[in-house]
């Protein structure tokens, strides 16, 4: 039986869910946040140590400004109202991606990381303004600048996921089968689960089903 240490999720389908049931993409994001909370709780119950959530990609800046503002407001309100609770639950928050947001949000993200840095129950890596290609290019630039030998171990020291084990599982909801510039290096040997349901409709039961399926997969890592 495989141990499950790290789950990464592409939380796709908020917009479609919102349009379908509430006539508003933004209300889909609001509902998606409820699923985030459920999955965090379930991850703790299932003794998962790392949960990486793709919340905003480097490509998402191409969306209408109104939607972008809504998403960041949602995040700001979430962190402001829930940070103490997150901290009390011994959850560590780590941001993957470049913090190029409003001064207020940048400060809040830095504060959340600093406050929770010693927590060990569950580490949530929130990918915000994250793009895997940019991450890799910047890692190679650093290696070149430092005249460091290029090998896997050295490259990983310059990725934003430094000291974070690779995901065992990637889940993508929303009935789309692509990686969307997410953790391209780190997902090399992850088991991938594409889920038809839209993110706001994804339940703990769906999550547990995937976890169970994963635990019984024979992982070869290139061996037979
Ligand atoms: C993708 O769905 C989802 C996002 C770009 C945002 C994810 C945000 C949340 C789950 C809520 C906020 C989270 C936090 C941590 C505050 P989409 O909008 O691309 O859906 P679509 O494919 O149906 O258009």
Image (spheres, grey):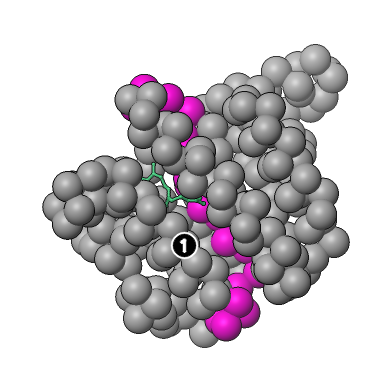
**Is residue 90 visible to the viewer in this orientation of the structure?**
yes
- 83 sits to left or right of 137: right
Is label 1's Cβ within 8 Å of ligand 1? yes
Q: Going 38% across and 38% down the picture, which residue do you hit?
A: 180
In the displayed structure, 23 sits above or below 117; it is above
Q: Position of residue 122 (x, y in %)?
A: 67, 68
Q: Going 57% across and 83% down the picture, which residue do you hit?
A: 45
Name the secondary structure under disc 1. helix
Q: Is residue 223 magenta?
A: no
Q: Position of residue 135 (x, y in %)?
A: 60, 30
- 155 sits to left or right of 215: right
Q: Position of residue 89 (x, y in %)?
A: 71, 73
Q: Is residue 55 magenta?
A: yes
The magenta region covers: 44-63
Q: Position of residue 130 (x, y in %)?
A: 54, 34
Residue at far top of view: 145
Q: Going 63% across and 41% down the picture, which residue do you hit?
A: 96
Q: Nearer the viewer, residue 87 or 73?
A: 73
Residue that badge 1 annotates: 36
């Amino acid at each position: 039986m495989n141990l499950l240490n790290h789950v990464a999720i592409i939380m796709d389908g908020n917009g479609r869910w919102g349009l379908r049931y509430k006539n508003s993409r933004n209300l889909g994001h609001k509902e998606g946040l409820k699923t985030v909370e459920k999955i965090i709780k379930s991850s703790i119950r299932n003794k998962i140590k790392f949960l990486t959530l793709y919340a905003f990609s480097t490509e998402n800046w191409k969306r209408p400004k109104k939607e972008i503002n809504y998403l960041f407001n949602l995040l700001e309100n979430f962190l402001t109202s829930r940070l103490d609770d997150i901290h009390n639950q011994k959850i560590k928050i780590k941001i993957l991606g470049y913090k190029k947001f409003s001064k207020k949000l940048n400060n809040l993200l830095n504060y959340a990381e600093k406050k929770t840095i010693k927590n060990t129950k569950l580490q949530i890596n929130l990918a915000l303004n994250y793009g895997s290609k940019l991450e890799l290019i910047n890692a190679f630039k650093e290696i070149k600048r430092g005249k460091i030998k290029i090998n896997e171990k050295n490259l990983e020291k310059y990725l934003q996921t430094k000291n974070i084990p690779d995901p065992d599982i990637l889940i993508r909801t929303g009935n789309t089968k692509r990686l969307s510039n997410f953790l391209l290096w780190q997902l090399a040997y992850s088991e991938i689960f594409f889920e038809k349901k839209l993110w706001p409709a994804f339940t703990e039961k769906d999550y547990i089903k995937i976890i169970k399926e994963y635990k019984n997969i024979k992982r070869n890592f290139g061996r037979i």
